[in-house]
Amino acid sequence: MIRRWPGRLRIRDKILGIIFFVVIFFGLFAIWQIRLEVSSALKRHLDRQGITVANDVAARSLDYIYTNNIFGLYLLIKDIVENDPEVRYIFIQDGAGNVIVSSFGRGVPAELLNVPADGDGIAPNVVVLETEEGRIHDLRVPLHNQTAEGGYVRVGMTEKGVAAALGDLTNRMLSVLLMATFLGMAIAYPLANLLSRPILTLAATVKEVGAGRMDKRVPPPGSSDEISELSISFNQMLDNLQEYNIKIRDFSRELVSRNEQLQMMSAELRQKEERLRYLLGKVITAQEEERRRIARELHDQTSQSLTSLMVGLRAVETAPEGPPAREARLRGLGRRCALSGRGVPEEGLDGASLQARIYSPAWDGSNL
């Protein structure tokens, strides 16, 4: 879920988010660096201030020490501690390490007395102590004659003032950062709209084209950047697609027209085939009827011719005439057979041949 939510943001929101995080990141980094530098500078200033206070106490305490005016010396260091909030404590040690006077009411803590000194004991020495009250810079300065035999002035400088100053500075810088962030966002918002408007327009056009409106085009953004080139390429792609769609639509129409023509021709062919089949049936029926009619006529005619021939033959057989008369009758019967359509020419049929055919073993009348 965390990986998916950036993908749901719009480009304008992403641009604003990037600007916001960049400003906040670099602002916080700058605040951190400034805090480090200021903290280091304030601590150095605190050390210098502590050394100044210690040197002042060392210079002013000599008369009190020589006169053994311990109470006056106590009032001196007490006044300094009460008037300077960064001074946590002051106490003076002699050369043997014994405390002459201190600002502590019940004695100096043993931890402070046991803090070792660095260096040769002549130059001011600074040791940072970690206490329950926070960090304290313990400064050790020689009491007089720039030697360690005369004793030390110990001044404790607290970092509470440094921490308070750093906190106040940090709050101010954070306030400035927030104001700068809001001002930057107010300036970046119209710029982000200006940058994202061509992309949003392109996305809206893509949605309309996806819905089937191929006549939509991306308006020119009026610039020569990458978005403008993308818009020009997208419009050119739409022009090519529209041209291809027109060609495909024309080709589809032509296919539909050809299909309709083929269907019409197929219907006509089916009608003609049915008509031809009907006519062929009629022809076959007519032929069969004609064949049957001719067969009946031939059968009737042949039957009549045979009957007449048989009657004539019987008459020839029973006739009392001689052979010439019988031959004449047989010749007359032959002509009658030729005239009945049996294919025997009248002049080619004589009595002998007709008599041979009639009395032939194959002639029994069943061939008819």
Image (cartoon, helix red, strand yellow):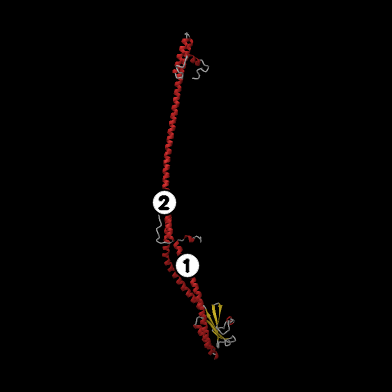
Please, what is the three-letter code of the amino acid marked with disc 2?
Glu
Q: CA distance from mark 2 to mark 1?
A: 47 Å
Up-down relation of residue 218 to residue 47 (above or below): above
Up-down relation of residue 38 to residue 237 (above or below): below
Question: In this view of the protein, which residue sits in the foreground, 101 or 234?
Answer: 234
Please identify the residue farthest to the front as the structure is shown. 348
Residue at image position (51%, 81%) is 48
Q: Which residue is mark 2?
A: 243
Residue at image position (51%, 77%) is 40
Please, what is the three-letter code of the amino acid marked with disc 1?
Val
The answer to whether residue 163 is visible is no
The answer to whether residue 191 is visible is yes
Q: Position of residue 187 (x, y in %)?
A: 42, 67
Q: Which residue is mark 1?
A: 22
Please identify the residue farthest to the bottom as the structure is shown. 67
Q: Earlier in the sequence, mark 2 or mark 1?
A: 1
